[in-house]
Image (cartoon, coloured by chain):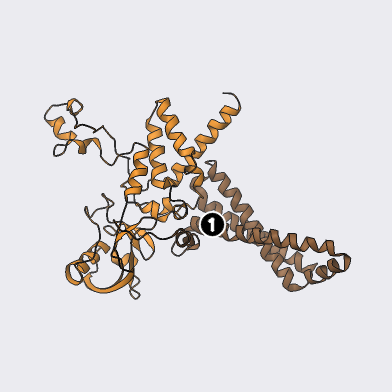
Amino acid sequence: MSTLDYRKVSRASRWLDVRRRKLGMWAYALNRITGIGLVVYLYLHLVVLSLLLRGQAAWDFFVTVARSPYVLALDVILLAGILIHGLNGLRIAMTGFGIGVGAQKALFVAVMVVSAVTLWVATIKIFRI
Amino acid sequence: MNMVKVPLQIFRYKPGQAPRYDTFMVEIPDTSHVIDAIDTVWAIHDRSLAFRRACHHSSCGSCAIRINGVEKLPCVTRVTDVWGGHDPLRLEPLRNFPVVSDLVVDVTGLFQRMSAADMSMICEAEAFLPFTVDTFAVAGLDPKLVELPENFSRFSRFEKCIECGICVSACPTMAADEKFLGPAGLAAIHQARKKSNDPVKVEHLLGLADGEHGVWRCHSAFECTEACPQAVDPAGKIMALRRELIARRFSKMMGK
């Protein structure tokens, strides 16, 4: 029987398709986006640290760049990723142990509220440095 | 009863041809269900449209499709509940199954997964068709004494689940792991495990659940539970299996 079977890459692209989906799927997609973002950041972080090998001048130049508002805005995005991925990870671990399965949506809302409040406070502090 | 004109955008695929979408304008009563609209397309516009339907009351699960991207049973979904009144109503086959033709998918994989948990699609009553268990009871006979055909064992139906495949279509993990037992398969394992006190069978079932393509593949999107038209709660069952597996591991670690 000849059937239409989509390729794995095409099927995996649906991971981020949250249209008309419920909160659990939004949490799923957010965890993937933030996870990929954090992996990219990890490599960027290693590249930045490697500047130390080029001496003090190179590092001082990076510190100057890092204090610009644009880079500070990137820090806020990074923090948002860490908060959402970390707290949502706790939610997934809890439900994975069978704890709070029925309240998974409420837990996700709590994750987002705590993330938003923490991010708000942290953003003010970051830009006041 | 008022008549409404509804544009339907239907996924089309025939072996050897490229997939496409065809749009049909159907005039149906405003109380119609989506399956009535599909029937109208088939009856009036295009006899080559392939789709499944049988019971018309959310009992057989055969008509499951995606309506505007979301898995639903068109036999119990009113057109007015899903059609915004402007854009065409988009009808597509279930995801994560090979498409046989138009809205028809090959659900063999789903049934194979259910069978892995000894959850056959045939319930005991159906084994005696055209007589039901009740018929035997009325006649004062014990159906258990009736000899079944060769290679035909007694099965009990997986309560609630209508084997529609909606949970498999809604599950994002199924898209990446073709061997994943999936929400229906794992819920069936949970059900079989609940019913069994036989240590050998319990070990077998938990071994399946604990395998490479078992419960640990689930990434907790909970879409299966959201989409299930029968409130089977496959995600809840998967988490319950995880809990039991973790408890058993702890017990082993403690030497119990």
Position of B169 with respect to A68 (left or right) is left
**Hey, which quadrant is residue B66 in on the image?**
bottom left
Q: Secondary structure at mark 1?
A: helix
Q: Residue at x 21, y 54 (%)?
A: B54
Does residue B233 show up?
no
Q: Indicate the amino acid at tag 1.
A: Ala
**Hey, which quadrant is residue B123 in on the image?**
top left
Reading the image, the residue beneath label 1 is: A27
Horizontal and vertical percent for residue B79? 29, 66
Does residue B107 show up?
yes
**Hey, which quadrant is residue A54 in on the image?**
bottom right
Q: Residue furthest top?
A: B256
Position of B66 with respect to B238 (left or right) is left
Q: Which quarter shows the C terminus of chain A?
A: bottom right
Of the chain colours in the picture, the one used for chain B is orange
Position of B119 with respect to B40 (left or right) is right
Q: Is the residue marked by circle 1 packed among few (<14), some (14-19), or many (20+) residues within 10 Å?
A: many
- B15 relative to B194, above or below: below
Q: Residue at x 53, y 59 (%)?
A: A29
| Near-viewer residue (A19 or B103) | B103
Q: Which quarter shows the N terminus of chain A?
A: bottom left
Horizontal and vertical percent for residue B15? 29, 63
Q: Residue furthest left?
A: B139
Report in which chain the residue with disc 1 lies: A
Horizontal and vertical percent for residue B212? 50, 42
Number of callouts: 1
Q: Residue furthest right?
A: A56
Horizontal and vertical percent for residue A18? 48, 62
Chain in brown, by letter, is A
